[in-house]
Amino acid sequence: MNPPLPAEALRLRCDPAQFEFATTAELADLDAALGQERALGAIEFGVGMRNEGYNLFAMGPEGIGRRTIVRRHLEAQAKTLPPPSDWCYVFNFKAPHKPRAQRLPAGQAPAFRDSMARLVEELRTAVPAAFETDEYRNRRQQIEAELGERQERVLGEFGERAKAQNIALIRTPTGFGFGPMSGEAVMEPEEYRKLPAAEQKRLEELVTRLQEELERVLHDLPKWRRESMRKLRELNREVTRAAVNSALEEVKAEYRALPEVQDYLAEVQEDMLENAEAFRASKDGEPVTLFGIPVARADAPEATLRRYAVNVLIEHSGAAGAPIVFEDNPSHDALLGRIEHLSQMGALVTDFTLIKAGALHRANGGYLVIDALKLLAQPFAWDALKRALRSREIRTQSLGQALSLVSTVSLEPEPIPLEVKVVLVGQRLHYYLLHAYDPEFAALFKVAVDFEEDMPRGPQNDLLYARVVAAFGRKEGLRPLEGAAVARVIEQGARDAGDAAKLSVSMQALADLLREADYWAAKAGRAAISAQDVQRAVDAQVERLDRVRQRLLENVLRGSQLIDTAGARSGQVNGLAMAQLGGFAFGIPQRITARVRLGSGGVVDIERESELGGPIHSKGVLILSGYLSGRYAPGRPLSLSASLVFEQNYGGIEGDSASSAELYALLSSLAEAPVRQSLAVTGSVNQHGDVQAIGGVNEKVEGFFDLCKARGLAGGQGVLIPRANEQHLMLREEVVAAVAEGKFAVYAVGTVDEGIELLTGVPALEVHARVEARLSEFAERARAYATGLGGKPWQKAKKK
Amino acid sequence: MAEGEEEVRIARIIACFAPGSAGSPEAVARLAAEMQAELLGLFIEDVELLRFAALPFAAEVGFPSAARRSVDLAGLERQLHAQAAGLRQALATALDPTAVSWSFRVARASPENAVEAALAEGYAPALIIPPRGNPRAERRVLRRPEISEEALRALLRSVQPVLILPA
């Protein structure tokens, strides 16, 4: 019969004596990611590859420091790169609804914006001043006088011609009329009526002819007026040109090396000449109001002058390298930027100054880090990001515009060339799902950065781990840890890894443990964190999450849930299940029973029949049929009907870790060999009867230990675990102590034979013999039924 | 400022307005406020115009539209009345907030008779702004006795304001 495992095999201790330091204050920082060589290599490769599509997907579970590691590497790389260009949006004079993207060397955009604002401000003084000069006033009067004189001369000549025919030209409020003269004045109506009809007719015809002539003359007047206006415009342009050129020269000189800016300034110059009136309008005019509320006017001079503004979209003043942007809210607009609107007379209007940068603008020329799940959860954000990466340009447009939901006139800003390395941080599931279901994903995210969850344990790695602990403590301002405390932290790291030979690299769990241990050390008034403080932190973590486990244990202790920890009973085994609630895992003993009878139904899994068992659990039970047939009835039909059940299980069961316990219950029932209830069992089994490894071995052992301890450790209690799980044992100190004192035992078993001997106290061969005999008896009886009754007895019974 | 005007304080500005050229009441008002002179707005309904409108075939050619349309006396009078009211309102708006003393009158006469009547009221020296005159243009200076009816007619056709000094 298997001996129990020695106490020292139940927990691989970290010997504090191996550390040559008293506290972690003596240790140098370790600025490295432990156990992440593969991920680091992938990051280095991905960051170094400048080709298209070599974006990164950093995958792994939460809390292992993916973002920190990525950030550290990106920061190191970003320092070696030059800051990218600044980008502005300026007015497009050729197509106002398509604002022009203007590139400027890093850090120069704000100066350009200020130069343009200064230019406009200067012109608001200089242009009106130019129009106030005597030169301008005189030339303008000359033009106006020319027009007036020309008109008066023509009308005067016309009047003289009419007068020569004894007809007066009379100015009316809205034009000119003709009336026959009597002497020097217009003829009185009575006098006119007294004239002979022939004379009246002659005068009327004369007046009509003159009117027609005047019409022809007046037709030319608008042409003269236009000519005069053109001259006036030319004069205005000339005066404005002098003021604009003088002010613009300075700005042009400043940006002489930038041809694109020169082009823009040339357009500005031309446009300013066209819109000189805007500079001449008063700044402080009467504001337009609607029901007393000031409203902006699209045609106001201020609105016209806005076109010379520079909207600095993104600038890199003082930047030492390429940007790294962590976008926490990767919505469509947050990535691509947005176009804001202003309310104007009840309508929403916009212009190029209302274009706002998105994360892609800010990260352009550098790196953008996004949480994959958050990105996928935002409507259309994933598609927008892919589109930008594929086209290598940022096209800012609202979601409504992109989906053609908004049909009002809006802006179509010129796209900005995109050169960015995107790092998505997510879980492995997301990576594999995207890879499987999104054909573009593989082309755009070629670099998988797969983070490890643990690292091998050993003296060298223990020391490295201690340095990580030291570095973190210093960074967070925590107390230094004593060597024993570090050893305890390392042991907890192995426990978190679920493997005595491994250390968890979950930085989140480590950080929480260290901060909480520091808290307890402070409470105890210690200058350094001791092993007790670490243990206290671990215990307190468990205690805070322990309520459900306590209630389940209470149910067993009060007899609501039937679990025996003493005595023996056929067909009844203590199995061990594991529950995970809110990040806290714990083991729960579970009674498994088996009943057998004559039949040909094989093994019935009541959990599956009642739809409480998951597929893996069902698979485990089906394997039992394979074992029984192969082991006991290779050459004949198995005349057995057996039922298996997890007693008092109402919440479903999944996994095959109880299949060995189920097999022991079956064998016990068939062999009528009572099973010791002081033992609990975990482990899956294959068709050959080999016991296989399971997960959560530590929690399961401790789950049964807690029950036995609550009832009083009698000495014969213990747990059977698969031998393959021996290496994973990192049990609690009190379990190890109980084993050392002989009050509890952990048995490692490799086969069903080893297990059944321990559970029944009956040699395995005898158990098998009894089972075989029972099955033979079933077979004989079945045959007898078949011969005597001409059919299968259970079928007959059914018919009856 | 014209020669000989330096020491003169203008007592009254006679701003003439005619139906065909309403001028700029605001500019006139500003000038009166600057000079602290009394302002008389004189809207002259030229009798020649009224006589013309009473003719049976009276028609006008619009300026600058060059559109021909008939004219009747009643319509013209309504037009004149509205124009006069508009001018009075414009002057009130510009001058009521100031301390300038002002009045407005509609005269149905020939322009020279209407101005002559206004000059006869005294208030020398007076500045006459012709109907199409520019209040800020260079002024002519004349003494009251030098002004014949013919000369006054010519002055009122000009754009130059005329400063009338007493004898």
Image (cartoon, coloured by chain):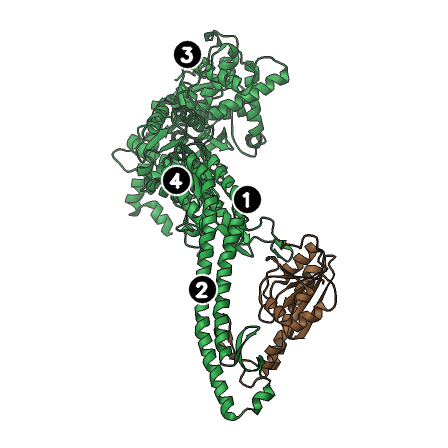
Residue indicated by mark 2: A224
Earlier-in-chain disc, 2 versus 4? 2
Give, as a three-letter code, the residue at label 4: Gln
Residue under circle 3?
A459
Residue at image position (31%, 47%) is: A789
Compared with residue A328, is residue A127 higher up or lower down, i.e. above or below? below
Q: CA distance from mark 1 to mark 3?
A: 79 Å
Q: CA distance from mark 1 to mark 2?
A: 32 Å
> In this orientation, which residue lies closer to the viewer: A308 or A296?
A308
Q: Is disc 1 in contact with disc 2, using a CB cutoff of under 8 Å?
A: no
- Whole-angstrom CA distance, mark 3 to mark 2, is 102 Å
**Distance Cα–Cα, label 4 vs label 3:** 67 Å
Q: Earlier in the sequence, mark 1 or mark 3?
A: 1
- The chain holding disc 1 is A
Same-chain check, marks 1 and 2:
yes
Tag 4–tag 3 contact (CB < 8 Å) = no
Secondary element type, mark 3 = helix
The colour with which the image depicts chain B is brown
| Front position among marks 4 and 1 | 1
Mark before the other along the chain sequence, 3 or 2:
2
Q: Quadrant of residue A570 in the image?
A: top left
Q: Which residue is mark 4?
A: A262
Screen quadrant of the N terminus of chain A: top left
